[in-house]
Image (spheres, helix red, strand yellow):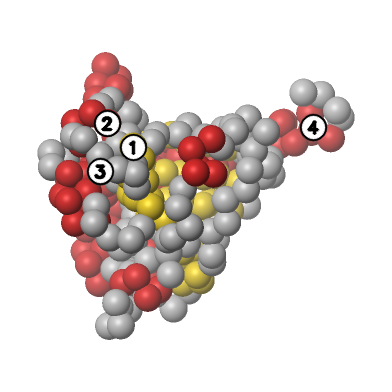
Amino acid sequence: MIASLFIGAAARRMLPELIGVARQCSADLIVRESLEFAGCVAAEALGLPHASVAAAADSALDRRRDLAGPLTRLRQQAGLPADPDGDMAYRYLHLCFIPPSFDGPGARFPPTARFFAHHSTPTPYQDLPPWLDQLAGRPTVLVSMGTVFHRTPGLHETILAALRDEPVNLLIAPGSGQDPARLGPLPPPHPVQAACARVGGRTRPVRRGLFCYSRLGRLASNTERKRLYINVYWISRQRQRQEEDGVT
Protein backbone atom coordinates (compact mmCIF):
# COMPACT_ATOMS: atom_id res chain seq x y z
CA MET A 1 0.00 0.00 0.00
CA ILE A 2 2.79 2.45 0.84
CA ALA A 3 4.56 1.90 -2.48
CA SER A 4 1.49 1.80 -4.73
CA LEU A 5 -0.81 4.29 -3.02
CA PHE A 6 1.03 6.75 -0.80
CA ILE A 7 4.10 6.98 -3.06
CA GLY A 8 2.95 5.70 -6.44
CA ALA A 9 -0.38 7.54 -6.64
CA ALA A 10 -0.78 10.18 -3.95
CA ALA A 11 2.71 11.67 -3.86
CA ARG A 12 3.15 11.58 -7.63
CA ARG A 13 0.01 13.67 -8.16
CA MET A 14 0.70 16.00 -5.27
CA LEU A 15 4.35 16.74 -6.03
CA PRO A 16 4.06 19.33 -8.85
CA GLU A 17 1.48 21.43 -7.02
CA LEU A 18 3.36 21.19 -3.75
CA ILE A 19 6.57 22.48 -5.34
CA GLY A 20 4.60 25.37 -6.78
CA VAL A 21 3.01 26.22 -3.44
CA ALA A 22 6.36 26.09 -1.66
CA ARG A 23 7.85 28.50 -4.17
CA GLN A 24 4.87 30.80 -4.00
CA CYS A 25 4.99 31.19 -0.22
CA SER A 26 8.81 31.11 -0.01
CA ALA A 27 8.72 28.24 2.45
CA ASP A 28 11.68 27.79 4.77
CA LEU A 29 10.72 24.30 5.91
CA ILE A 30 8.41 21.46 4.94
CA VAL A 31 6.94 19.25 7.67
CA ARG A 32 5.24 16.08 6.52
CA GLU A 33 3.29 13.28 8.10
CA SER A 34 5.26 10.05 7.86
CA LEU A 35 2.98 8.49 5.20
CA GLU A 36 3.11 11.58 2.98
CA PHE A 37 6.15 11.52 0.66
CA ALA A 38 5.73 14.44 -1.73
CA GLY A 39 6.84 16.79 1.04
CA CYS A 40 10.37 15.45 1.42
CA VAL A 41 10.88 15.21 -2.35
CA ALA A 42 9.63 18.75 -2.90
CA ALA A 43 11.87 20.01 -0.13
CA GLU A 44 14.97 18.40 -1.60
CA ALA A 45 14.10 19.65 -5.07
CA LEU A 46 13.97 23.19 -3.66
CA GLY A 47 16.97 22.81 -1.36
CA LEU A 48 14.87 23.07 1.81
CA PRO A 49 15.14 21.14 5.08
CA HIS A 50 12.26 18.85 5.91
CA ALA A 51 10.97 16.94 8.92
CA SER A 52 8.62 13.99 9.31
CA VAL A 53 6.17 13.24 12.11
CA ALA A 54 5.48 9.60 12.95
CA ALA A 55 1.72 9.17 12.67
CA ALA A 56 1.10 5.41 12.82
CA ALA A 57 1.77 2.72 15.39
CA ASP A 58 5.01 1.55 13.75
CA SER A 59 6.01 4.67 11.83
CA ALA A 60 8.87 5.49 14.19
CA LEU A 61 10.83 2.53 12.79
CA ASP A 62 13.70 2.94 10.34
CA ARG A 63 12.26 2.06 6.93
CA ARG A 64 14.91 3.67 4.73
CA ARG A 65 15.79 0.45 2.92
CA ASP A 66 12.14 -0.35 2.21
CA LEU A 67 11.42 3.17 0.95
CA ALA A 68 14.53 3.70 -1.18
CA GLY A 69 13.26 1.73 -4.18
CA PRO A 70 9.67 3.06 -4.32
CA LEU A 71 10.90 6.64 -3.85
CA THR A 72 13.31 6.42 -6.80
CA ARG A 73 10.65 7.22 -9.42
CA LEU A 74 9.30 10.09 -7.33
CA ARG A 75 12.76 11.60 -7.02
CA GLN A 76 13.26 11.24 -10.77
CA GLN A 77 10.02 13.12 -11.34
CA ALA A 78 11.53 16.07 -9.44
CA GLY A 79 14.85 15.80 -11.27
CA LEU A 80 16.73 14.47 -8.24
CA PRO A 81 19.56 11.92 -8.37
CA ALA A 82 19.27 8.42 -6.97
CA ASP A 83 19.14 7.90 -3.22
CA PRO A 84 19.96 4.17 -2.94
CA ASP A 85 20.11 4.14 0.87
CA GLY A 86 16.81 6.01 1.32
CA ASP A 87 18.39 8.68 3.51
CA MET A 88 15.98 11.32 2.23
CA ALA A 89 13.05 9.94 4.23
CA TYR A 90 14.50 11.01 7.59
CA ARG A 91 17.41 13.18 6.53
CA TYR A 92 16.91 16.04 8.99
CA LEU A 93 14.41 15.14 11.72
CA HIS A 94 11.91 12.40 12.52
CA LEU A 95 9.55 13.34 15.38
CA CYS A 96 7.96 10.48 17.33
CA PHE A 97 5.38 10.58 20.10
CA ILE A 98 5.20 6.87 20.89
CA PRO A 99 7.70 5.49 23.46
CA PRO A 100 10.47 3.53 21.68
CA SER A 101 9.83 0.56 23.97
CA PHE A 102 6.45 0.05 22.25
CA ASP A 103 8.25 -1.29 19.16
CA GLY A 104 10.15 -3.95 21.09
CA PRO A 105 13.75 -4.41 22.18
CA GLY A 106 15.01 -5.14 18.66
CA ALA A 107 13.47 -2.08 17.03
CA ARG A 108 15.72 0.14 14.91
CA PHE A 109 15.05 3.83 14.49
CA PRO A 110 16.47 6.45 12.11
CA PRO A 111 19.47 8.32 13.51
CA THR A 112 17.46 11.54 13.35
CA ALA A 113 14.55 10.15 15.39
CA ARG A 114 13.63 12.18 18.45
CA PHE A 115 11.08 10.93 20.97
CA PHE A 116 8.78 13.20 22.92
CA ALA A 117 6.05 12.55 25.44
CA HIS A 118 2.59 13.59 24.32
CA HIS A 119 0.71 15.85 26.72
CA SER A 120 -2.92 16.68 26.04
CA THR A 121 -3.86 20.22 26.94
CA PRO A 122 -7.42 21.24 27.80
CA THR A 123 -9.15 23.56 25.39
CA PRO A 124 -11.91 26.10 26.03
CA TYR A 125 -14.04 24.43 23.38
CA GLN A 126 -14.45 20.98 24.88
CA ASP A 127 -15.54 19.97 28.38
CA LEU A 128 -14.54 16.55 29.63
CA PRO A 129 -17.44 14.10 29.90
CA PRO A 130 -18.76 13.85 33.49
CA TRP A 131 -18.33 10.07 33.63
CA LEU A 132 -14.53 10.50 33.69
CA ASP A 133 -14.78 11.49 37.36
CA GLN A 134 -16.65 8.27 38.08
CA LEU A 135 -13.96 5.91 36.80
CA ALA A 136 -12.44 3.55 39.34
CA GLY A 137 -8.97 4.30 40.63
CA ARG A 138 -7.13 1.92 38.34
CA PRO A 139 -5.22 2.17 35.05
CA THR A 140 -7.19 3.50 32.11
CA VAL A 141 -6.75 2.11 28.59
CA LEU A 142 -8.00 4.07 25.56
CA VAL A 143 -8.67 2.11 22.37
CA SER A 144 -8.71 4.28 19.25
CA MET A 145 -8.14 2.83 15.78
CA GLY A 146 -7.85 6.08 13.84
CA THR A 147 -9.87 7.07 10.78
CA VAL A 148 -9.53 3.87 8.72
CA PHE A 149 -9.14 0.70 10.74
CA HIS A 150 -11.97 1.52 13.14
CA ARG A 151 -14.21 0.01 10.46
CA THR A 152 -12.46 -3.38 10.59
CA PRO A 153 -15.15 -5.96 11.52
CA GLY A 154 -14.61 -7.59 14.90
CA LEU A 155 -11.56 -5.52 15.87
CA HIS A 156 -13.08 -3.63 18.79
CA GLU A 157 -14.98 -6.72 19.86
CA THR A 158 -11.72 -8.70 20.06
CA ILE A 159 -10.04 -6.04 22.18
CA LEU A 160 -13.06 -5.86 24.45
CA ALA A 161 -13.11 -9.63 24.91
CA ALA A 162 -9.40 -9.65 25.78
CA LEU A 163 -9.56 -6.82 28.33
CA ARG A 164 -13.06 -6.90 29.81
CA ASP A 165 -11.96 -8.97 32.83
CA GLU A 166 -8.71 -7.09 33.42
CA PRO A 167 -8.48 -4.58 36.31
CA VAL A 168 -8.53 -1.53 34.02
CA ASN A 169 -10.91 1.17 32.87
CA LEU A 170 -11.34 0.48 29.18
CA LEU A 171 -12.42 3.41 27.00
CA ILE A 172 -13.28 2.57 23.41
CA ALA A 173 -13.58 5.29 20.78
CA PRO A 174 -15.46 3.42 18.01
CA GLY A 175 -14.99 6.22 15.47
CA SER A 176 -17.32 7.99 13.07
CA GLY A 177 -20.18 6.00 11.63
CA GLN A 178 -19.86 3.24 14.22
CA ASP A 179 -22.66 2.31 16.62
CA PRO A 180 -21.35 1.56 20.15
CA ALA A 181 -24.33 -0.77 20.60
CA ARG A 182 -22.60 -3.33 18.37
CA LEU A 183 -20.19 -3.99 21.24
CA GLY A 184 -23.04 -5.68 23.08
CA PRO A 185 -23.84 -5.47 26.80
CA LEU A 186 -21.08 -4.07 28.97
CA PRO A 187 -20.25 -5.78 32.26
CA PRO A 188 -21.15 -3.93 35.49
CA PRO A 189 -20.11 -1.66 37.02
CA HIS A 190 -19.51 -0.31 33.52
CA PRO A 191 -15.70 -0.56 33.35
CA VAL A 192 -16.05 -0.19 29.59
CA GLN A 193 -17.17 3.14 28.17
CA ALA A 194 -17.84 3.52 24.46
CA ALA A 195 -16.83 7.10 23.85
CA CYS A 196 -16.12 9.25 20.85
CA ALA A 197 -15.03 12.80 21.60
CA ARG A 198 -14.48 15.59 19.14
CA VAL A 199 -11.41 17.62 19.98
CA GLY A 200 -11.49 21.35 19.37
CA GLY A 201 -8.88 24.03 19.66
CA ARG A 202 -6.73 26.45 17.78
CA THR A 203 -3.36 26.15 16.14
CA ARG A 204 -0.54 28.61 16.45
CA PRO A 205 0.44 30.30 13.17
CA VAL A 206 3.69 29.09 11.63
CA ARG A 207 5.42 31.46 9.28
CA ARG A 208 6.45 30.25 5.86
CA GLY A 209 6.01 26.58 6.65
CA LEU A 210 4.30 23.79 4.72
CA PHE A 211 2.55 20.92 6.47
CA CYS A 212 1.69 17.86 4.40
CA TYR A 213 -0.25 14.78 5.39
CA SER A 214 -2.15 11.93 3.76
CA ARG A 215 -5.83 11.28 4.38
CA LEU A 216 -6.58 7.70 3.38
CA GLY A 217 -9.92 7.90 5.13
CA ARG A 218 -11.13 10.58 2.70
CA LEU A 219 -10.17 9.00 -0.64
CA ALA A 220 -13.73 8.59 -1.83
CA SER A 221 -14.65 12.23 -1.14
CA ASN A 222 -12.54 13.58 -3.99
CA THR A 223 -13.17 11.15 -6.82
CA GLU A 224 -14.92 13.83 -8.83
CA ARG A 225 -11.60 15.62 -9.17
CA LYS A 226 -9.86 12.33 -10.05
CA ARG A 227 -7.12 12.79 -7.51
CA LEU A 228 -6.52 11.84 -3.92
CA TYR A 229 -7.75 14.00 -1.11
CA ILE A 230 -4.47 15.47 0.11
CA ASN A 231 -4.57 18.54 2.33
CA VAL A 232 -1.78 21.06 2.20
CA TYR A 233 -1.73 23.97 4.59
CA TRP A 234 0.49 26.95 4.16
CA ILE A 235 0.90 30.46 5.48
CA SER A 236 2.18 32.84 2.88
CA ARG A 237 4.25 35.95 3.22
CA GLN A 238 1.15 37.95 2.38
CA ARG A 239 -0.60 36.47 5.42
CA GLN A 240 2.46 37.23 7.50
CA ARG A 241 2.37 40.88 6.47
CA GLN A 242 -1.34 41.06 7.24
CA GLU A 243 -0.76 39.74 10.76
CA GLU A 244 2.08 42.16 11.34
CA ASP A 245 -0.18 45.01 10.20
CA GLY A 246 -2.96 43.82 12.50
CA VAL A 247 -5.21 42.73 9.63
CA THR A 248 -7.22 39.56 10.33
Seen from the viewer's position, the closer of residues 166 and 128 is 166
The mark nearer the N terminus, 2 or 3, is 2
Residue 32 position, x and y percent, is 46, 51
SS at circle 1: strand
Marks 2/3: CA–CA distance: 14 Å
Three-letter amino acid code at the position of disc 1: Ala
Vertically, is 172 above or below 97? above
Observer-side mark, 3 or 4, equals 3
The mark nearer the N terminus, 2 or 4, is 2
In contact (CB < 8 Å): disc 1 and disc 2: yes
In contact (CB < 8 Å): disc 2 and disc 4: no
In contact (CB < 8 Å): disc 1 and disc 4: no
Three-letter amino acid code at the position of disc 3: Pro
Observer-side mark, 2 or 4, equals 2
Residue occupying the point 36% across, 58% down: 168
Visible residue check, residue 238: yes
SS at circle 4: helix
Query: Callout 4: few (<14), some (14-19), or many (20+) C-alpha neighbours within 10 Å?
Result: few
Observer-side mark, 2 or 3, equals 3
Observer-side mark, 1 or 4, equals 1
Q: Mark 2 points at which residue?
A: 180
Residue 187, which numbered label?
A: 3
Query: Callout 1: few (<14), some (14-19), or many (20+) C-alpha neighbours within 10 Å?
Result: some
